Image (cartoon, rainbow, N blue to C red):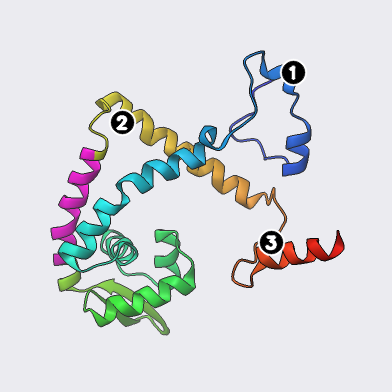
Amino acid sequence: MPTPSRHATTAPFPSALASTDPASLGAAAHAPQLDDMLMYRLYRAWSSASPVFVRLCEGRFGITRREWRLLATAVENGPTTSAGLAGAADLDLVRTSRTLGTLCEKGWLQRQADPHDARTVRVQATPAGRALYQQVMPEIAQLNTLFMADLDEDERGLLLRLLRTLESRGARMAADNIVEDKACRHAGGTRRTARTAAVTC
């Protein structure tokens, strides 16, 4: 089976699945299991260390991980709009707006009118926010180093490069809309689907 180009447009999910020939996978192939899934392994790796980061951020510095994510993004990227901050932090605008309000209440971020366009409001870190960033970031960096302590320097560099490649591939998959079904978790989509299936069966 030819190896797909890393930059090729991803085929629609059902077609891509149908085009997979099990015989071509070799005699050692086995039925996929949850533990074989890369995204699941990445989640397990993240969740194994997540409590340590939570205790550091919330217990020692009184800042949630999402607040820290936005504060660090604001410090590192400079003044920007709420939408710009959400995009840089890879968060949706609704959650960003709520967290931004909390950060402003805590005095770590502030909103200011753009001097060149009164209709535009920009967000930037306050001196207190930058001071907190200078306190927290070295601690976060130390935990990240400890998290990767079993990898040598070459392995760490390779891992980061591979993760960036996977991020790009994931973004293209999302943009290509390979799964067209709409998630509806807030409206009880899964339960509603189950009830509908029970009625129609």
Magenta run includes residue 74: no
Main SS class of the magenta portion in the image: helix
In this picture, is 146 found above or below 98?
above
> Which image quarter is the C terminus in?
bottom right
In this picture, is 128 found above or below 55?
below
**Badge 3: few (under 14), some or many (20 or more) residues near its Cα, within 10 Å?**
few
User: Residue 182: which disc?
Assistant: 3
**Badge 1: few (under 14), some or many (20 or more) residues near its Cα, within 10 Å?**
few
| Residues drawn in magenta | 131-146
The image quarter in which residue 89 lies:
bottom left
Q: What is the x, y in percent for residue 21? A: 76, 24
Magenta run includes residue 134: yes
Question: What is the CA distance from the residue labelled 2 to the residue labelled 3?
Answer: 37 Å
Q: Confirm or deny contact between disc 2 and disc 3 (CB under 8 A).
A: no
Name the secondary structure under disc 1: helix
**Badge 2: few (under 14), some or many (20 or more) residues near its Cα, within 10 Å?**
some
Q: What is the x, y in percent for residue 56? A: 20, 57
Q: Confirm or deny contact between disc 3 and disc 1 (CB under 8 A).
A: no
Residue beneath disc 1: 23
In this rendered view, identify the residue nearer to me: 38 or 11: 38
In this rendered view, identify the residue nearer to me: 132 or 47: 47
Amino acid type, residue under disc 1 in the picture? Ala
In this rendered view, identify the residue nearer to me: 103 or 61: 61
Residue beneath disc 2: 156
Left/right of residue 144 with respect to residue 201 in the rendered view: left
Give the mark, 2 or 3, whose residue is nearer the N terminus: 2
